Amino acid sequence: MGVVSGYSLPAEEADGLRAAARAALAAQGSPAGHEFYEGLEEHLHRVPESIRTALNALHASSSVCALRISGVRVDPDRCGSTPLSWQEALDDGRQDTEEAQLALLAACLGEPFSWPTIQRGRMVQNLVPVESDREAQSGHGSVALEWHTEDGFHPDRCRYLMLLGIRNPDRVPTTLGCVHDVRLTERGRAVLGERRFLIRPDPEHLRQLAEFAPESAMLRRAHEMDENPEPVALLFGDPDTPHLRIDAPYTTPLPGDDEAAEALAAIVGELGRAQRDVVVGEGDVLIVDNYRAVHGRRAFEPRFDGTDRWLKRMSVAGGPPPGARRAAGARTRAL
Ligand SMILES: O=C(O)CCC(=O)C(=O)O
Ligand SMILES: [Fe+2]
């Protein structure tokens, strides 16, 4: 049974984390930029020990697929009203303390990074519903976001995806499906472990790249990954505690491979069956092991009046699981 573990911060530790974040902010600048993460070690030592223990337990476990830490100090009034777009939130420093807390947790777990194609490379991204993106399969849509491995198409995708709730008044759930919960035939597992599948880039990368760097080599590379993707396996690593990569809307079997199509349908069905809801509310941090769980979001009715659901998001490269390629050291991934 895949496990979502929970850790509720005692008041003292919540205060300790906030104090560590404030000290880091004063010394390192904004967590939105890369400089914040350089030479951060001394600040990581100030994160209360029990929090670091909980993060280490997630890292060390092969059965836990997500951890929810609750009770993080968030002050929604000081944060301000929910922005109507991620662009509007780019330079807003009012959530620095919240972002620095998330950033410290991220840096305790591994190596935080950003994509140049997502929210202009901002290290902490803003997830808010956007009116023009209502139907989009992205963090800015409000239709159901189908489950996926974050950046499943990319070999340097994150090990951990982290979400911090600033506000979520309607308690709109994030969805999670753990690889340990899928029941498959032996043959199905074997097929899913072979390079018989294609995962195309999610169009949000292509869209934002086309907007800000239409002539770039990066955009050409992204198009290449879209038009000519390399075949990959969907299950890999230790067969007893497998890793998973799959992005339901953008994953297909190799053309004409009926056996792969059948195995894909089976795992899609199983992940759907195993799916559970986890609400990231105010002061909750959800950490998804992106190698062991897929995630998505339920549909919801957005308000567009400054009171909408608002999450902060970070991507973290963890010590690579066996067999995975080590991600490049740079804080901004090239596509
Ligand atoms: O809004 C959510 O709960 C999840 C959105 C999502 O898939 C993401 O940020 O990667
Ligand atoms: Fe996602």
Image (cartoon, helix red, strand yellow):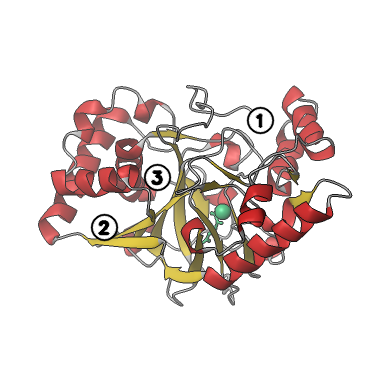
Classify 10 Å Cα crowding around label 2: few (below 14), some (14-19), many (20 and above). many
Of all residues, the one furthest to the right in this rendering is 256
Q: Quadrant of ligand 1?
A: bottom right
Count the labels in the image: 3
Quadrant of the rendered image containing residue 294:
bottom right
Q: Which residue appears farthest toward the front when viewing the image? A: 186
Location of the N terminus by quadrant is bottom left
Q: Nearer the viewer, residue 55 or 262?
A: 262
Please state which of the two labelled residues, at mark 1 or mark 2, is closer to the viewer. Answer: 1
Name the N-terminal-most of marks 1 and 2: 2
Residue 314 visible in this rendered orientation of the protein: yes
For marks 2 and 3, give the one nearer the viewer.
2
Mark number displayed over residue 93: 3
Which residue is pictured at 28% across the width and 28% down the height? 40
Instruction: Indicate yes or no: mark 3 CB to ligand 1 under 8 Å.
Output: no
The image position of residue 262, as x and y in percent, is 76, 60
* Pointer 2 or 3: first along the chain: 2
Which residue bears the numbered disc 1? 335
**Whole-percent x and y of residue 165?**
39, 61
Cα separation between marks 1 and 2: 33 Å
Q: Kindly indicate the quadrant of the structure image that contains residue 135.
A: bottom right
Q: Is residue 167 left or right of residue 21?
A: right
Q: CA distance from mark 2 to mark 3?
A: 19 Å
Check contact, mark 1 vs mark 3: CB within 8 A.
no
Q: Residue at x 71, y 57 (%)?
A: 264
Q: CA distance from mark 1 to mark 3?
A: 28 Å
Q: Element at badge 2?
A: loop
- Residue with the mark numbered 2: 72
Q: Which amino acid lies under the numbered mark 2 shown in the image of this protein?
A: Val
Is residue 269 or residue 218 the one in the foreground? 269
Question: What's the amino acid at mark 1?
Answer: Leu
